[in-house]
Each structure stands twice: as C-alpha cells, then as structure tokens.
Image (cartoon, rainbow, N blue to C red):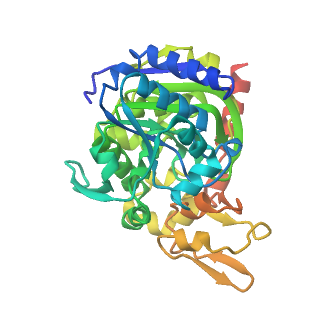
Amino acid sequence: MNRETISDVSLVRCADYEREATMTAIRRALDALGGMSSFVKSGDRVLIKPNMLKAKSPESAVTTHPEVVRAVIRLVRECGGRPMVGDSPGMGDLKKVAEKSGILKVLVEEGAELTELVDVVQVKNTGRFKRFEIARAAYEADVIINLPKLKTHGMTTLTGAVKNLFGCIPGKRKVQWHFNTGINHGLFMRMLVELYALLDPQLTIMDAVIGMEGNGPGSGDPRWIGAILASGDGVALDIVAGKMVGVPPEKLPIIKAAAAAGIGATKLDRIRILGEALEHVAVSRYRLPPQTHLEWQIPEWARGSLKNAFTSKPLINHERCIQCGICQGHCPQKAIQSAGRHLQIRYRDCIRCFCCQEFCPQGAITVGRGWMLALLPKQGEKRERREKTAK
C-alpha cells in the first residue's frame, strides 16, 4: 500500500447481536465503503476468517459472534460469492470450536462450508521473511474477508485485524514461529504484518459489539463497546479500534512493526473515519494487560539479562490450575514443568509469547509485570491522571 494513500475505516454503532440489528450495522458499515460488491464478485470463492481461538460460548467474547458470521455469509451470497468459513484454532478441533461458539449452527442454517485450514502450501515472500507455510484454502481463495474480535492480548496489547490472520498458519506451525523469533517480540510482530500483507485480505470487519478486556485473548472479561468497524486496510482499522478503547498507535507493537515495514496506513492523519465520530463510540477505562512493549527499547544484546525486569510475564494461579497440561503442550520453549503438586514456569527459558496464558482453559494464567514495570504507573492509571489534569 502506498504511504500517501488515505485509508477509509467505517465505524457504526451496533447495540447488540440481535440478528437484524447486526445485519443492518454491517450493511451500513460496508455501504460507506461502496458495499460488499466492491470486494466480492459473482463466482468468487470467499474465505471468511473469524477468530475461533478455542471452544467457548458466544457470551464469553472469545470468538467472533455467530451473528456477525451469518451477516457476512448472506452479504457475500447477495453478490454471487461462494462463502466458506475457516480457521485453524490454536487449541481443539475446529468443528468442536465451531459448535461451542455457535458458528457451526449458523453454517448449518445458512448452508455454508466449514473449512479447516490444515493443508499447507509454501509461499515465497519479498520481505524480511522469505517463506511462509500457510493454509492452501487461504492462499487460493479469490477473496479473504477477515472477521477479528477486539480483545486484549498479553503479547500484543490488543489483538485485531492483523493478528487474526495468524490463524491462517496451521496448527503447530504457529508454535514454531514463536520458537523461531524467541524473545525478539519485534521480530514476531514483523512476521505478523508480513503475513497480513502476503495474504492481503480484501476486507476486514471487526466485531467490537462486545469485546474482551483484562486477561485476554482467551480468559478475559467481556466488555460492551457497541461498534462494528470495517475497512480494506486492516492496519488502519486496528489503529481506530485501539483509539476507541484508549490505546494510541504508538502503544501498539503491531502498528510499530507495520510502520517499519511500510504496510498499511500507520498514521492517524492518513486515516479517514466514516460513519460515527470516534469520540461518540469510544469507551473509557478499558482494562489492558500490563505493559509489554518496553523491552523493545532495550538494546538487543541486553534483552536476555534484563527481560525479567522490563517485560511482563505469565503467572500461574495455583488455586485455579488443574494441571491439565495444555499450557505445557503449547509452550514452544518447554519452559513449564511439574513441581510437586504445582506447575512452574522457568522464566530463564520463557520467551513471553503468552501461548500458555492464551490457551489455558481455566483462566489460571495471567499477565504479571516485571519488577521494573511494577515501578511504573499502569496505563489505566496514567489515563486517569490525564483526565484529572484536563478537568
């Protein structure tokens, strides 16, 4: 994308997931961008990529809401497109995730196809990473429509449009990427934005009706926001979503990586918001995970010795932990071990990818602050101070 291009992000209100209200809101969001027909043509094979992290009910706000998926399926069909809904969950069988999340019921009712993103194709890339192994269904689709859920994330602060396409890397290959990039979180973010650019989704529609705050992306608390966002530029959309919940672009590591790679509109003055004014939809005191971005300001040679001080880290709540072993199985560094009746994290080996926290089915792993971060005010505290000063 040309850095001089203005990216449009459509922002509309949507109070709840009532079927007609959801369809109306998404149609309005797309009408501001020229309608679904601007993105889908008759005969197009369209991959609809929701967030299907794990098997949780729609009320938990872990996955894209099924009524958002239903609305997009219908709008694609109105244009003559052939919709298929696919993902590669980090944990669990896709069909079970689809069933628990309510998405499978929608697919059965709408007669749409569920596609597990497992068959792999190797694709050359012109960026820093020369090759990606991605799902064939994603690579060969005529159109990709990205349906992220707005949630917090221990590693990326917020997870949205760019991060959602990590699901197009099948299964255990996700863990391998964490292993390959290690403690260098900036390198991992660069991988995410290059993957986003390689897949080049034609359209992103974000479910921000009910998002997730706190211990996201899998065990946080649902938070009503009441919005649907849409754009042809997922990077710009992530910036607007961040501003909506009080996080400026410079605090989002994915945006920093996108700016370095020249991918998407990464400055607010290159983004035009259509529909609702941002200040009318913005929410206050959105609970974020502890700061995780300060380690990128440390020289690379010193990161290993200082990471415990300047990075957030996963913490195990032993009262909630049932020792199911899922966190151990998903740790790319094998840094979690049994210690008597408890699990223990070897922090010298931990790369702070937060896979353990993301996939813990009990919500027993949270994000803690390194001792230097603990001396700094939390992001929410700083916002409250600014608000008081402004008054």
Can residue 213 be seen in the rendering of this structure?
no
In the shown orientation, is residue 44 left or right of residue 105?
left
Q: Give the residue furthest to the bottom.
A: 340
Residue drawn at 59 percent across, 38 percent down: 66
Residue 127, given in percent of the width and then of the height, sits at 23, 48
Residue 370, given in percent of the width and then of the height, sits at 61, 60
Residue 173: quadrant of the picture: bottom left
Residue 108: quadrant of the picture: top right
**Number of numbered discs on residues:** 0
Residue 254: quadrant of the picture: top left
Q: Quadrant of the C terminus?
A: top right
Instruction: Choose between 82 and 337: the one closer to the eye.
Output: 82
In the shown orientation, is residue 2 left or right of residue 336?
left
The correct choice, above or below, for 328 with respect to 87 in the image is below
Q: Quadrant of the N terminus?
A: top left
Q: Give the residue furthest to the right.
A: 319
Residue drawn at 50 percent across, 74 percent down: 349
Residue 48, given in percent of the width and then of the height, sits at 43, 39
Residue drawn at 36 percent across, 25 percent down: 80
Residue 289, given in percent of the width and then of the height, sits at 63, 48
Instruction: Choose between 255 and 230: the one closer to the eye.
Output: 230
Instruction: Choose between 284 and 159: the one closer to the eye.
Output: 159
Residue drawn at 52 percent across, 26 percent down: 229
Can residue 29 be seen in the rendering of this structure?
yes
Instruction: Choose between 351 and 147: the one closer to the eye.
Output: 147
The correct choice, above or below, for 234 with respect to 172 in the image is above
